Amino acid sequence: MSLEENKQQETKSYIDSTLDPFNSGFLLPTFVEYYEEIFQRSNFLTKKQYDRFLEQIRLKLPIAFRVLETSSSKSLAMEFLVDLKKELNSMIDLDKEFTGELTQFEWYPNKTAFQLNAYPQQLRKNKKYFALRKFLREENERAGLSRQEVVSMFPPLCLNLEKGDKILDLCAAPGSKTIQLIELLKQANEKGNEKTDEGFVIANDVSSKRCHTLFHRLKKVGEPNLIVTSYKAQLFPNLLVPLDEKLKKQYEEEIDKKFKKKIEKENEEKKENENEKEKEKEKEKEKEKEKENENENENEKENENENENEKCLKKPVLFDKVLADVPCTGDGTFRKTNKEWENWSPKLGIQMHDVQFQIVKRGVELLKPGGRLVYSTCSMNPLENEAVVARLLNYFGLDTIHLVDPKTLFENKFEWKKGMKKWKVLSVSYKNKGGKSKQKTVDNDNENDENNSKTTRPKNLTKEEEEKFFAGGGRVVELSKMSILKGEEIKNRKRNTKKVIWFDSYDQVPERLHEHLPESLFPPSEELGNKMELDKCMRFLPYHFNSGGFFVAILEKNVNHPTKKYQRKMYKKDQFFNEAPFYNISQLIKNNEIEKTNLDDLLLKPLQLNENFPKESVYSRSKKIKNILYLGKGISQIMDYSGDYLHIVNGGVRIAALDKFSTRFTKEGLKSVFPYTKRKLPIEKEDLKVILTGGKSREKHTFSEKLQKQLEKLGNGPIIFFYNNQNYSHLISAMVGKNRIAHFIEKNDKMLILSDINKED
């Protein structure tokens, strides 16, 4: 038997074993039966494609990752991976049993996305992967790469980010797509001659615990134009920012006109009152009291008018781009872990449908005219994908939003399956053999149920009669309800039967099931479906990129359509939300709430920051200032105008740490502060080795004379040492004392920098 025949035989035996739930322990027949009907019998996939789909989804997931554009060692990492790719691919030619091909995806911007045809266990055991394993570990520690499944890279790319975009990631955790958004926004801002640092990313997740984990991952990127919030995505509030100068003048003019009319009316009323006072001298005392009351009411009205004026000078934030990577059943991720097979049920897609719609609906409401929203799931189920998109298009109308053809972005670059225009919806009922049904279903009628009189369905139908009754509503299939049982439990368990009924349209659904199978689950009519152009959606199956299953839909809000106000009130913070607030340090000084009376003494002078530094954008999480955070312009406006109400878990970049005696630079804020500070010096390789090979501090005389002279001119205090190479650069925070220099480098970072320097030698 040849090697290829042997591999085919092994694959066939593996597939056969997984088809038998008593051998494999997986609830696979239900999954296979479901997608056989959805994909194959509906002619969405050919027999060959469906067999390939089943074969691929049982294989373990390969390792995929991206080299980050923000990495200080990007060029060195790319050089290493290109060389390793040639080396591993040459091994395949020599050793046919070795299958560890490293693929570089040409379609990804700057070709920084890679995939290794091996899974983590092989990476640990096979010596041929030793260099790659070490590289992945080091780059992960220095935030030089992001481990991310290939198909999950598409949603951020589909947003097609531009300069200064305001971006909302509604369901951000665990954060790989958010990192990608930050990276793509930076690239967009640096395009062309005019660079900008405008735009921002708001990463939201419902779980505050996941938000903390998310920010811990994101802070390594060091992005000031970022905040992490914790809300249910479908309840994300309207954010407020100040109006532009032109709009301010317009509002002020309108308000002045209203006030003038009110004042004229009030003056007329006063004149009438004065005439009445002259005529009625006897009631002068009483009228004087009434005057006093009127004056008090006038003052109250003036205060109310001032508050109205303040509200008018704010506007809600509408986002340029929204990513709605919604929670789903996750049947496209089964390659990651076999445990997911055990919990899968065809009912899950029906349960998730409404939540997914509510989330993406809120995303469209927060989108500005001409803006773009990407809806994505890691599910292959049309009830979670095309059905949600069709419901969304129907809800807002095609004059408000429309689907974008992905060919405009990815034509001739790779393959995908077009969206489905027709699909079936099932009803599942579980019934013990020879016993009573556990729930009310299509195949079980309760004689005492008064609600049953609403439907004309006859009782005790045969299979043929039932099919006729549902007017071709689909096949009626009897399957055994497979469970995860072993040994004697299998022999002793009561065997259950499961009846699956497929419906082509909502008209075929009996009235009693309308509550459980809403009309939005079903495909639109042929005429409406053609207008919606659901085939513009993208479905990725496991065999497309040797990855998981994924669905992506690109939607745009029409430019000429008038924007409706979808107000969602910003209530005060929940009493159970215990995160520390963000205090604008300039405001604290202005209100005399801290000891320092000048921001220069607190931050600007110790770090010698120049006039261009945006000092109005520095914050603290406490009035006892120990850490200073820097937030980008767009984020700081939201913080100042909406921060009292927002559930903000974290955000910005920590640029300085304070104690009783000094102020120093922080590791994560070095990139943000570097352009503004004068306290920075280049450092030679030999001097850098002195810092890295010693303890936390070294005496000044151990460094070169050149550096000692530079330090003498600069004076004692915090400093940034920078070391530049063709392939990488390093920034180091340190403190210069009278006789010693102390550094603030963590142990892992020290090892990474030493490793880079040694490679030069």
Image: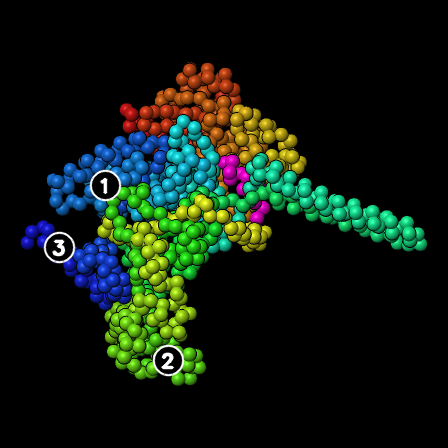
In this picture, is 480 found above or below 689?
below
Give the structural element (helix, strand or loop) at label 2: loop
Say what amino acid the circle numbered 2 marks.
Thr
Residue 456: which numbered mark, if any? 2
Tell me the residue at 32%/47% (across/down).
405
Counting labels gives: 3
Question: Quick one: quadrant of the N terminus?
Answer: bottom left
Q: Which residue is mark 3?
A: 8
Q: Which residue is mark 1?
A: 103
Residue closest to the far bottom: 447
* Left or right for 677, reference 504: right
Between the C-alphas of marks 2 and 1, the distance is 60 Å
| Magenta stretch prevailing secondary structure | helix
Give the structural element (helix, strand or loop) at label 1: strand
Question: Quick one: quadrant of the C terminus?
Answer: top left
Say what amino acid the circle numbered 3 marks.
Gln
* Left or right for 606, reference 362: right
Closest to the observer: 649 or 247? 247
Mark 3 vs mark 2, foreground winner is: 2
In this picture, is 573 found above or below 426?
above
Tell me the residue at 50%/16% (across/down).
713
Q: Position of residue 157 (x, y in %)?
A: 35, 42
Asked whether the beta carbons under mark 1 and mark 3 sit within 8 Å of each other, the answer is no
Between the C-alphas of marks 1 and 3, the distance is 23 Å
Say what amino acid the circle numbered 1 marks.
Thr
Q: For residue 212, say whether it is visible.
A: no
Few, some or many C-alpha atoms within 10 Å of disc 2 (few <14, some 14-19, many ≥20)? few
Q: Position of residue 22 (x, y in %)?
A: 23, 67
Closest to the observer: 266 or 589? 266
Q: Which residues are magenta?
A: 631-645
